Amino acid sequence: MKILYIHQYFKTPDEGGANRSYFMAQALKEKGHQVDMLTAHNESADKSKRVDGLNVHYLAVSYNNKYGFIKRISAFLKFIMLCKSYIKKHNNYDKIIATSTPLTIGFIALWAKRKFNIPYVFEVRDLWPEAPIQMGVIRNPLLKIWLQKKELDFYKNAERVIALSPGMRNHIEKRVPNVNVDLIPNVADCDFFSRVEEKDEDLVLQYGVKNKFVVSYFGAVGPVNDLMSLIKCAELSTHLPIRFLIMGEGLSLDSIKNYVSENQLKNVFFIPYGTKEEVRDVMNVTDACYVSFLHKPVLRTNSPNKFFDAIASGKLIITNIQGWIRGLVEKRHIGFFADSDFPTEFSEKIKPFIESPDLLRKYQIASRSTAEQFFSRKKLSQHFVQAIEGKSLRQEAEVRSIFSLSA
């Protein structure tokens, strides 16, 4: 098949960020499909180039995680317009893969289906518009109703819908019972990341963490990520030999840096957002990874990329997320739940892992084992290929089994 893969935030491993679309496209290519990626970049002009066997078409749509609501919406709308212009000139595709967020990707896929009769698969990474509605970003009642109606249109007209978590799948199936929804979670890159027995001494010195228990946070630093919950834990853990490393970017980063500086928190350090190799370096010196979101029901359904990097690296997981992530962490014994409403509990829960290297190692081994057994990139990318090819997913019962642990 000749496939057009639309992802506004497409990133290669060299660029850092979420690489799911890159790996899924590579899996399709390896099965003999031609994949054209349609995405955006912050340069002033469109361009196309060959990237590891993929034809990648970059549209000139500036975007930054620090953008406010209006600038984000403007970027989404511009991307829709430019994608339509591209598809008008290049519409000899057998299928489209449209991956959110944003939900506005659905407008492009639905338009292409109606105008050029190109079927599409809709991949749901976050529940829009439910997330911005619960966050209070979208308040106009008429706009809510209209967006929810469009969400249904995108699902109903899709050949297939792929959800990244059981909560997302349940939401979609409840909204549109007759739509075929497949559960294909985010992937753990168990080839690139590995569990290390001994930290690299050069990296330990580079990051200034000698004789310290290291808790790291990777990824977006926006309002929904609730990184202040980690800062509160750091404030109440100054009596422990912990160093908190933050490698991220986003709208809330500057305010969090200011808070750390104003309150003279000497145990919190910020690292520039980096490539996948740089993430691996920080993982090397890390003992535990912190995964967080605000306490909003819709955010419990999320499938955060860095959680999967963390378990592939065999790290203790600390999370403040209710829902499937908490269930998985606790029932697989790979970490613990740190309720952001009670930050004083953090130091008591982490103390046993600081005092007992054997206990820490046991949890870290279980973390890596969970990644290998249930979230292997190679295995799940093949599930993705099967879904795009219109086949029934083999081994889906195995994927369901791990999520049943976290119900």
Image (spheres, rainbow, N blue to C red):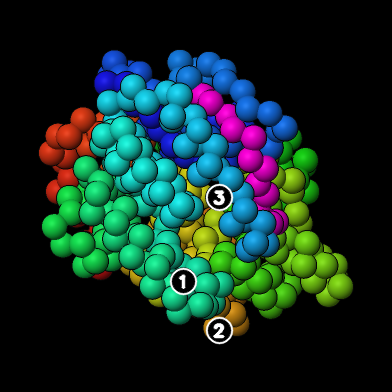
Mark 1, residues whose alpha carbon is within 10 Å: few (<14), some, or many (≥20)? Answer: few
Where does the N terminus fall, quadrant-wise?
A: top left
Please state which of the two labelled residues, at mark 2 or mark 3, is closer to the viewer: 3
SS at badge 3: helix
Tell me which label, 1 or 2, sits earlier in the chain.
1
Q: Residue at x 71, y 33 (%)?
A: 43
Q: Are marks 2 and 3 in contact (CB under 8 Å)?
A: no
Q: Nearer the viewer, mark 1 or mark 2?
A: 1
Q: What numbered label is drawn on residue 217? A: none
Q: Position of residue 241 (x, y in %)?
A: 70, 64
**Closer to the camera in the image, 80 or 336:** 80
Question: Which quarter shows the C terminus?
Answer: bottom left
Where on the picture, by quarter, is residue 199? Answer: top right
Going from N to C along the chain, the mark reached first, 1 or 3, is 3
- What's the distance in space between the residues labelled 1 and 3, CA to CA? 16 Å
The number of numbered badges drawn on the structure is 3
Q: Is residue 124 visible?
A: yes
Residue 342's disc number: 2
Name the kind of residue labelled 1 in the image.
Leu
Is 64 part of what is drawn in magenta? yes
- The amino acid at mark 2 is Phe
Q: Is residue 355 visible?
A: no
Q: Amino acid at mark 3?
A: Leu
Q: Which residues are magenta?
A: 56-67
Tag 2, which secondary structure?
loop
Please tell me which residue is depicted at 16% across the width and 39% down the height of the picture: 393
Circle 1 — which element?
helix
Would you name the residue on which mark 1 appears?
A: 143
> What residue is shown at x 45% (from left), y 15% (from top)?
53
Image spot of residue 143 (x, y percent): 46, 71
Residue occupied by mark 3? 77
| Residue 128 drawn at (x, y percent) | 42, 62
